[in-house]
Image (cartoon, rainbow, N blue to C red):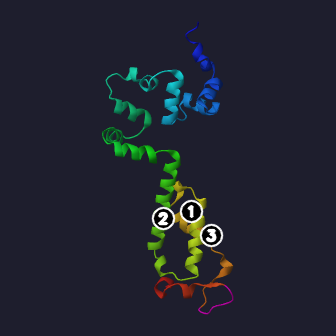
């Protein structure tokens, strides 16, 4: 009996990727270093290849380094975070929960969007009255929906708001004309000046 027969799926990227339940492209990116597998996929690789994680990550080549240093090197996570997680199970549970991609995105989006909404609320909008404030808030929510988080900044928000305000619905006269929003009645005299 051939002792390597159980590793027959290692003959190609296609067969190994299939065994790991990932696309061949994904596995190829891991091999060439373009991306790295998630920790659960690293565990799957270890199970499929019947090896421990130290061996998989090349720990034999890193003699003299602590497991925390090796983990930090390969994961790019701060060694302080790793050491804290090793010593504090509550912290580790928190990290494991919020570092999962589904939970991480939700947390980051929620935190970032809440911070931007608070910033908008504190940034002179307290002096803007209806119906202009509703229009600006709607435009802001559109900005949040269509702008990647990495591109959020005051300049892009201002540009977006200016481009999204329908010019035919805004009036700067002192009297209300038709159905347009009269800016003079929505802003304090100081802001108008």
Does the magenta stretch mainly form a helix, a strand or a loop? Answer: loop
Q: How many marks?
A: 3
Point out the tag, 3 or 1, that comes first from the N-terminus: 1
Residue 31 is tagged as none
Residue tagged 2? 116
Residue tagged 1? 144
Res 118 → quadrant:
bottom left
Residue tagged 3? 163
On whether residue 190 falls in the magenta region, the answer is no
Q: Residue furthest front?
A: 1
Q: Nearer the viewer, mark 3 or mark 2?
A: 2
Residue at the image point whose x is 49% and y is 67% from the top: 117
Point out the tag, 3 or 2, that comes first from the N-terminus: 2
SS label for mark 2: helix
Picture coordinates of residue 135, whole percent (x, y)? 60, 76
Q: Which residues are magenta?
A: 174-179
Q: Is residue 75 left or right of residue 4?
A: left
> In the figure, 138 relative to 87: above or below?
below
Q: Nearer the viewer, mark 3 or mark 1?
A: 1
Picture coordinates of residue 74, whole percent (x, y)? 43, 33
SS label for mark 3: helix
């Amino acid at each position: 009996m051939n002792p390597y027969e159980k590793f027959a799926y290692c003959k190609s990227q296609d067969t190994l990727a299939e065994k790991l339940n990932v696309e061949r492209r994904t596995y190829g990116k891991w091999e060439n270093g373009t991306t790295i597998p998630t920790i659960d996929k690293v565990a799957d690789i270890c199970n499929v290849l019947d090896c421990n994680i130290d061996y998989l990550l090349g720990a034999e080549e890193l003699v003299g380094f602590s497991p925390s240093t090796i983990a930090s090197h390969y994961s790019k996570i701060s060694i302080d975070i790793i050491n804290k997680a090793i010593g504090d199970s509550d912290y580790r549970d928190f990290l494991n929960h919020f570092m999962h991609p589904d939970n991480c995105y939700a947390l980051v989006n929620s935190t970032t969007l809440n911070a931007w909404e608070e910033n908008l609320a504190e940034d002179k909008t307290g002096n803007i009255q209806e119906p202009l404030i509703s229009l600006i808030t709607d435009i802001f929510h559109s900005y949040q929906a269509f702008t990647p988080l990495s591109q959020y900044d005051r300049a892009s928000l201002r540009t977006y708001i200016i481009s999204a305000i329908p010019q035919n619905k805004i009036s700067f006269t002192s009297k209300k004309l038709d159905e347009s929003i009269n800016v003079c009645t929505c802003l304090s005299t100081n802001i108008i000046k």
